[in-house]
Image (cartoon, rainbow, N blue to C red):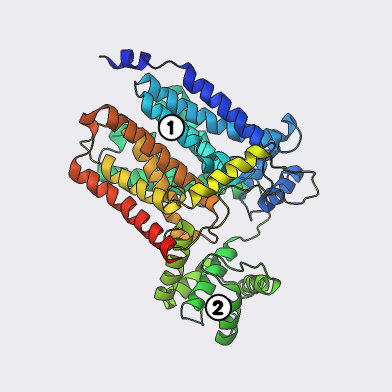
Amino acid sequence: MPRARRGAAFPAWPPALAVALLYAAQIAAFRWGVITPDTVFQWGQALSGRYDDWHPPATAWAWRQLMPLGPGTAPVLLAQCALYWAAAWLIADTLRRRGDGWAAAAVLLVAAAPIPFGQMGAILKDPLLAACCLLAAALILARPRAAVPLAVGLLVFASATRINAPFATAPLLVALLPPRWTDRPARLAAALVLSAALLFAAGALINRVMLRPHRAQPIFSLLNFDLAGIVAHGDATAYPNLAPAVAARVTARCYDPAQYNPGFGETCDRVEDALFAHAAAQARSPAAIWIGAVAAAPGAWARHRLAHFNRNMRLFVPAVPDDAVYIMSEPNPFGLRFVPNAATLLVRRAAMGLATSPLGRPATWLAVALGLLLAAGASTTRLPSRRFVLGLAASAAGYGGAYAMISVAPDLRYNLWTMLAAAMALAVALGEWARDPACRPSRGRAALALAPAALAVAAELAGLAIG
């Protein structure tokens, strides 16, 4: 049967109706957005139009543009969730028109899963990045030529919302390129490197030049965490401005593999301030201090980074933090307030239950992304949505993997895009493999692709058992 006729067997209205209902339910559960400390910090800058770079100012700038549309954070929540559900509908409808009704249904189930559904209710840069990237990926799948500039614009903006965002956006930009530009490994590698460089440059242009922020030097937060980690793992001389005995004493009080200063004590904060002052007085860049410390104790740095990455990915841990969905309302002078309702609490309970299982762990979905790259990456594969699946899988793997080096905290929201992108790619791939056996990977390649996820799940279950 021709593809068009098979596609006609699945009507257009069920996905559209499901998306409309889910969008309305999300707004009802999170009206008008969860207010976190980061929300308050950036909202004040959005109101004033004066920015600093502790958080990339592109997010606060975008919020400022929406303010004329309504009071408080309502326009932000409405727009953010609209981007998210527009992407989910476009992916599902494209698959439906191709005759992949089950894959379309799976995509909507992923979008409605408690963790991404609930995380989209927070006024933060992480769900905004995820919504923009997902819509760009949807345009890659649908491939209307007129929408390519929109997809590129979404990726450029998303690249400015987090310093590490180009690890997520560069693979999606490459997926937009003509196939002949990436049909060989050397060309593909060059395209990835060039795309990442351009997107890093675009983010810097927006955040450092166009919006002219006050330079708060957030890089010192990462530098201080790594220096403390090096001290904690055996080299007390890592701090250039502290005697080894002092560094060891401070680190014992302030360092945890999950993050620096988990108790938010003022003494610990002063260590970072003193490091900043020392660098300024010595005219030393944070990069130079970091390179010197890592070069002097690479083993200690690697052990620190592995311990933190384990916490971040929630791989081999006895328990997971209660942060699957935020429901807080940080006090603020701007009149912003979030009041959870019965629907909010239901989503939160479901998300927390999922977060304790392998299906709610970033490590699982990072492993799934790697497996999809193995399964769908063969040049002989006939997977119809191959570029979409590979683009999402590479984006998930690049973004999640980058946290091995640049993360300073293990909040689940940082891994929202890795989890969502990998799950969306898996839903589409499984749907197409189920419909057409000819596009399935060989048994050997399938077994190889399953190995990362199997190992991740085994480690996660072992951590729970030991705990």
In x, y percent, where is residue 383?
A: 27, 32
Query: Helix, strand or loop at disc 2?
Result: loop
Q: Nearer the viewer, residue 450 or 288?
A: 450
What's the residue at 65%, 68% (across, down)? 263
**Does residue 35 sit above or below 343 in this rendering?**
below
The N terminus - image quarter: top left
Q: Residues within 10 Å of mark 1 (few under 14, many from 20)?
A: many
Dot 2 amino acid type: Tyr
In x, y percent, where is residue 402?
A: 44, 55
Q: Nearer the viewer, residue 285 or 116?
A: 116
**Does residue 106 sit above or below 350 in this rendering?**
above
In x, y percent, where is residue 23?
A: 58, 29
332 to the left or right of 52: right
Q: Is residue 62 visible?
A: no
**Which residue was labeled with disc 2?**
239
Closer to viewer: mark 1 or mark 2: 1
First of labels 1, 2 by sequence position:
1
Query: Helix, strand or loop at disc 1?
Result: helix
**Which residue was labeled with disc 1?**
107
Dot 1 amino acid type: Val
Q: Is residue 196 visible?
A: yes
Determine the residue located farthest toward the front in the rendered image.
Answer: 465
In x, y percent, where is residue 52?
A: 67, 53
